[in-house]
Image (cartoon, rainbow, N blue to C red):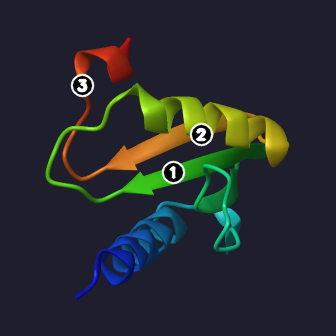
């Protein structure tokens, strides 16, 4: 499985879980996503998600990307979903 296929598989899993917990109007962004993978609505709030399936903890780069994507996609909240956790810099 290529890294791209692995990433798409993780994004699909995230999409399914978001749907299960009550997000509506879910959609994947285009391949050139500008820092966002999934957009969805929960209780009237628009969320922009970045999905990361890596072995290492995620740094602040993905946080910066999803914050910029929130503005681009006119979201209210931005979220990074990571299978490996986050560095201290990303958390702060």
Residues packed near mark 2 inside 10 Å, few (<14), some (14 to 19) or many (20 plus):
many
Residues packed near mark 1 inside 10 Å, few (<14), some (14 to 19) or many (20 plus):
many
Are discs 1 and 3 less than 8 Å apart at CB?
no
Q: What element carries label 2?
A: helix
Q: What residue do we see at 48% from left, 60% from top?
A: 21
Q: Which disc number belongs to residue 87?
A: 3
Q: Which disc number belongs to residue 50?
A: 1
Q: What residue do we see at 69% from left, 68% from top?
A: 29
In x, y percent, where is residue 23? 61, 60
Which quadrant would the N terminus be assigned to in this image? bottom left
Which quadrant would the C terminus be assigned to in this image? top left
In x, y percent, where is residue 18? 50, 63
Q: What element carries label 3?
A: loop
Q: Distance between the Cα atoms at labels 2 and 3?
A: 16 Å
Q: How many marks?
A: 3
Q: Mark 2 points at which residue?
A: 66
Side of 19 relative to 34 (left or right) = left
Q: Which disc number belongs to residue 60?
A: none
Side of 5 relative to 26 (left or right) = left
Residue 68 vs 31, above or below: the answer is: above
Q: Distance between the Cα atoms at labels 1 and 3?
A: 16 Å
**Image quadrant assignment for residue 33:** bottom right
């Amino acid at each position: 499985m290529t890294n791209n296929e692995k990433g798409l598989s993780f994004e699909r899993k995230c999409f399914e879980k978001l749907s299960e917990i009550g997000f509506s109007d879910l959609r994947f962004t285009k391949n050139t996503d500008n820092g966002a993978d999934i957009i969805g609505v929960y209780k009237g709030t628009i969320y922009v998600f970045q999905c990361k399936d890596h072995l290492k903890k995620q740094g602040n780069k993905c946080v910066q990307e999803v914050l910029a994507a929130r503005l681009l996609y006119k979201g209210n909240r931005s979220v990074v979903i990571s299978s490996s956790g986050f560095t201290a810099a990303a958390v702060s």
